[in-house]
Structure formats: C-alpha cells, structure tokens
Image (spheres, grey):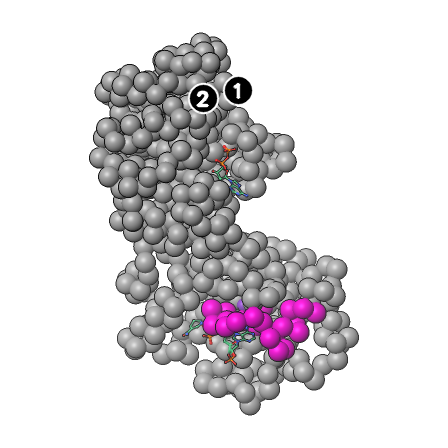
C-alpha cells in the first residue's frame, strides 16, 4: 500500500475531481468512512445503552479536514447519535463544500459552538464530558506552526486534561505535519486515525506515528491507478506484503538450495555477535553458514553453535591479518553470499579486508556494523561488481553521509532512497520506522516491531535474517524488506512473552518460528 506526501495526495484529489468526481462526493465518502470508524470505536470501547446518551464532540477546522468532520457529524446524527460541533472560525469564514456541509449540519439540528464564544471552563467541561472526540481541525493542508483557535484548542486539551477522552483523528492528528511526521509546535494525540485513500508519510514517521494510534486507511473513491500515477514507489511493508513475499521452499531440495553464507564476523571480546547472526541466518531458513573469523576465537565460537562451520583466518593477537584477504576471497568461491561486520572490530586489517572484498568479489554482499564503519571511499560501493546491501543504523548512516543523526532521522525516507540510488545498492536504514530502499527507487517503510528491538545484538540478528532471505529469494530488495518485517514481528512476539523491557536479541531468534507459522 502506497505512502503519500501532502502534494501527492492533493494531486490524487485533483485528478479524481477533474475526472468528473464531484468534490462534495469525495468529501461525503471521507465523512462516511469517518462515521463508520467512529461507530466501530464506540461499539468496541464504550459501554452504553442508548446512542443518544453518548457525547460525541467534533472539533472542526476551517479547511476540508473540518468539512470531513462536519459531514461525519451529520451522518452520525442521522444514525441516531447526538454529536456536537466546536467550530474554530465563524460560519461566515467557511467556503465551498465546507460551507455547504455546515448548512447541512444546521439543517440537521446539530448543536454547534464557536470556540471563540466559549469560556475556557465551558470548553474544558465540554471536552471532559465527551465519550469520543473527533479531531477534524487540521489535515494535510497544515502550514507552519499551529496558531489561533486551533492552537488554543490543542494546548488546552493537552495541558488541562489529566485524562483525555477517546480520540479519533480525521486523516491525520491535528498538528502533525503530513510530509514528515514532525510536530507543528504541538499536536492532538489520537487513539485512532482514519486516513483517506492512502497512508500519509507523517503517520508512519516519528513523532507522528506515536500520535496516530491505530491507523485505518479507507477507500473514498480515488482509484488505485490514480494513486499509483501520482505517487513515488514508497510503500508500507506489512503482513500482507510479507505473505506475498515469503519464498516458496521446494521439497526437492538440499541444504545448498537454501544458500551457503560466508559470515565474516567476530573479534576477541565480540564473540557473541557472530553467533547471533549465524543463528538468525540458520533459523531464518539458510542452508549453511561458514563463520570466517580470527584463529584465536574460531574454536570458541564454533563451540557455541554446533550447526556452524568455523574457518580460522590468519591473525595475530586476535586481529585478522591484512593478508587474510586472499584466503577469504578464495574461500568465498564456494559460497552464494557474504555478510560482513557484526563484532568484527575496526582495525587496519578489517579495513583492508572489506576494501578487498569490495574490489574483488561479485557475490551478493551484506555489510553491517564495523564493515560499514571502516569504509572511507564510497566509490568502492558504487563500483562493486555484485549486488550490495548496507544495513546502517542512523549513527552509521551519519558516518557514511557526513550528515548528523538528527538530519538523518528528520528525513529518513529521502536520505535512504537517494543514497541507494546514488550508489546503486540496497539500503536498510535501521531504527524506529526502518526504511528499505532499492537502487531503482523502490522503497518500503516497515510496519512491524517495537522499542523492545532496541537491544544489544538486535542488529546482528537482522543481518543474519537478511542473508537468509536473500539466499532464498532472488530480488534482494524484497528479501531485505521481508527480513526487516520478520525481525520486527518476531520482536513483537518476543515482547508479548517477555515485555519490551525484558526481551533480548536471542528472544527475537527464538520467536522467528511464530512469524514463519503466521506467514505460511
Ligand atoms: N481535497 C479533497 O477533495 C479532499 C480532502 N479531504 C480532506 O481535506 C483535508 C485537506 O484539506 P485542506 O487542503 O483544506 O487543508 P486542511 O488540512 O483542512 O487545513 C487547511 C485549513 O487549516 C488552516 N491552517 C493551516 N495551517 C494551520 C496552522 N498551522 N494552524 C492553524 N490553522 C492552520 C488553513 O487556514 P489558512 O491558512 O487558509 O488561513 C485552512 O483553513 C485532508 O486532510 C482531508 O481530511 C478529504 O475530504 C478527501 C477529499
Ligand atoms: N525503537 C525502535 N523501534 C523499532 N525498531 C527498533 C527500535 N530501535 C531499534 N530498532 C531495531 O533494532 C535493530 C537494532 O540494530 P543495531 O542498532 O544495529 O543494534 P546492535 O548493533 O546492538 O545489534 C535494528 O533492526 C533497528 O531497526
Ligand atoms: K485531523
């Protein structure tokens, strides 16, 4: 499912209206979807005897987001509810379809207040008594910081109410910038968001994602072709996408059919990382893992995982010698893909090894952690002869690009995509709302996972999973996006069993089976 910017959404609206779909009809569809969602929430969350005893408060802005709200209030009134409306402007300031929907609200005898005419106490009391607030103050048309009555309403609710009533946001929580998920000063937190036609970026990026609650995308008459034509290949990776992408395992197969991985990882003091990666790769469905690591720790690591084949590299005091490059390249002739980085360390030998692999190999190559940190010449990435995948967290991405972590996180989608296209590689930009970007411009925002994944070794697990899925699926970009989804979903299961606080990276691996069972 597509993810849009406000400009793209506007183009979709305009194209639909131009193709003979009257604007009022589009708004009525949005309103009907909002009313249905409000009713679903009421039935699920509130115990009541009569619809008419419920207090439904609609906060109405001056633009089309407010128009959606006005029409939804009227529909719910016709269904037997008693909605009330708080208007942020005077009725004479409404125009077009919004003025018409206001007239219809009056005609349907809905109780209407103007915020400016209410005393603060009266407004607070009205909100406090509400069973459900429908937030139709601001949608995709937000410009600049929140101001005027809209700002007063958001500030009053956020500052004066200890417990906020149940809230449904129309299209996007008011105050969240639809283009990037940032706050326009402040925003109204929702328990649910009903969003029109497609996801908006701001609903999936932080802090916006924290304000949106449960999101439902509703169809309002905009054709999927129109959305396709006016969007930019950015999609969400959800369960539906994962089910579609899960590689089919042939029965007539052997361990070679599911890939042989050369894993270049580990160093003295960092012997756990390669085990997490190798175990995740094997539990992810990969056929065989060779761990290439410093001679001093090769035996010790092999002892931790009986399924592992350990290969000792020439080293001194645990540091891999620069001369190991030839041995590694020779060895990788018998494997299908290489993953390098977890716990590898960053000394000179490691840098030489990674540079040599980038210059000489043409296998599918995944670089993570220390293998990313030692790269100083980005041209090596561009010139790599095989298919390359990088998995930086924002800190590693900052080092690769010269940008700050804040800049990266403020513009995750575009930065990841530009880098992937410029250097012709798959990029997994990790962190809350992981972005997977392809060299050809495709990109996914991942929807699974939680803060429990922010635990030592979690990234090592992801690298193993990416290798496993890449070995089983020919489209490396899709494989990486699927691995990110599965990692996140396994993390959700791990959090259910242990809590976000108490889960560790091994719990993610232990729960992979549940994800595969769910997706099969
Ligand atoms: N187009 C369609 O056919 C369809 C559109 N749909 C719906 O329309 C929504 C988009 O509507 P929109 O474009 O009218 O913008 P919207 O979000 O209501 O905001 C504009 C209003 O807010 C005001 N305002 C702006 N910034 C502000 C701030 N910082 N602080 C305070 N006020 C601020 C701005 O004031 P002005 O700048 O004009 O003074 C203006 O009055 C979309 O999210 C969806 O819900 C659906 O019904 C499907 C069909
Ligand atoms: N708050 C969060 N929500 C969802 N996923 C997260 C969050 N924080 C981290 N993650 C995920 O956890 C993993 C952490 O990887 P990384 O930073 O490399 O950790 P480590 O180096 O400890 O293994 C990544 O897949 C990342 O996307
Ligand atoms: K809204």
x and y, in percent, of residue 50 in the image: 67, 66
Return the residue nearer the eye: 140 or 129. 140
Q: Determine which residue is flagged by label 2.
A: 266
Q: Is residue 251 visible?
A: no
Seen from this angle, which residue lies furthest front? 348
Q: Within 8 Å: ligand 2 and the Cβ of disc 1?
A: no
Q: Determine which residue is flagged by label 1.
A: 269
Seen from this angle, which residue lies furthest right? 121
- Residue at point 36%, 54% (across, down): 234
Q: Which stretch did the figure color magenta?
A: 135-156
Picture quadrant of residue 87 = bottom right
Callout 1: SS? loop
Which numbered marker is on residue 66?
A: none
x and y, in percent, of residue 448 in the image: 48, 43
Q: Are marks 1 and 2 in contact (CB under 8 Å)?
A: no
User: Quick check: is 147 in the magenta stretch?
Assistant: yes
């Amino acid at each position: 499912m597509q993810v849009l910017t406000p400009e793209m959404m506007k183009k979709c609206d305009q194209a639909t209206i131009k193709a003979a779909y009257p604007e009022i009809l589009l708004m009525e569809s949005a309103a009907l979807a909002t009313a249905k969602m409000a009713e679903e929430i009421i039935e699920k969350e509130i115990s009541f005897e009569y619809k008419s005893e419920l207090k439904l408060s609609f906060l109405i802005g001056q633009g089309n987001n407010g128009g959606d709200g006005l029409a939804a209030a009227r529909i719910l009134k016709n269904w037997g509810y008693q909605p009330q409306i708080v208007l942020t402007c005077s009725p004479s300031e409404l125009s077009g379809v919004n003025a018409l929907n206001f007239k219809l609200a009056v005609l349907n005898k809905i109780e209407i207040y103007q915020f400016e005419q209410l005393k603060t106490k009266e407004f607070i009391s009205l909100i406090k008594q509400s069973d459900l607030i429908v937030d139709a103050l601001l949608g995709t048309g937000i410009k600049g910081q929140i101001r005027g009555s809209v700002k007063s309403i958001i500030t009053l609710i956020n500052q004066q109410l200890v417990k906020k009533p149940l809230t449904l946001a129309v299209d996007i929580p008011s105050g969240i910038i639809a283009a990037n998920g940032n706050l326009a000063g402040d925003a109204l937190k929702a328990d649910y968001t009903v969003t029109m036609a497609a996801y908006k970026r701001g609903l999936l990026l932080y802090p916006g994602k924290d304000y949106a609650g449960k999101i439902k995308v509703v169809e309002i008459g905009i054709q999927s072709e129109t959305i396709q034509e006016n969007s930019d290949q950015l999609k969400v990776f959800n369960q539906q996408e994962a089910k579609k992408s899960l590689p089919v395992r042939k029965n007539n197969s052997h361990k070679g059919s599911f890939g042989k991985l050369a894993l270049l990882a580990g160093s003295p003091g960092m012997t756990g990382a390669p085990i997490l990666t190798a175990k995740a790769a094997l539990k992810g469905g990969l056929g065989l893992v060779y761990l290439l690591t410093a001679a001093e720790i090769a035996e010790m690591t092999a002892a931790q995982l009986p399924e592992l084949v350990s290969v000792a590299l020439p080293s001194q005091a645990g540091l891999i010698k620069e001369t190991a490059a030839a041995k590694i390249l020779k060895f990788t002739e018998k494997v299908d893909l290489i993953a390098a980085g977890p716990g590898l360390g960053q000394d000179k030998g490691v840098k030489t090894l990674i540079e040599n692999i980038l210059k000489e190999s043409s296998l599918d190559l995944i670089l993570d952690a220390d293998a990313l940190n030692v790269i100083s010449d980005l041209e090596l990435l561009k010139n790599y002869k095989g298919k390359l995948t990088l998995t930086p967290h924002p800190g590693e991405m900052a080092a690769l690009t010269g940008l700050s972590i804040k800049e990266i996180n403020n513009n995750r989608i575009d930065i990841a995509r530009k880098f992937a296209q410029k250097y012709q590689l798959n990029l997994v930009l990790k962190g809350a709302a992981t972005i997977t970007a392809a060299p050809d411009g495709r990109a996914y925002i991942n929807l699974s996972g939680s803060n429990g994944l922010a635990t030592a070794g979690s990234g090592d697990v992801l690298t193993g999973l990416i290798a496993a899925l890449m070995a089983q699926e020919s489209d490396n970009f899709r494989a990486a996006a699927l691995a990110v989804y599965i990692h996140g979903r396994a993390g959700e299961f791990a959090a259910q069993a242990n809590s976000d606080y108490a889960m560790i990276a091994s719990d993610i691996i232990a729960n992979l089976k549940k994800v595969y069972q769910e997706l099969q």
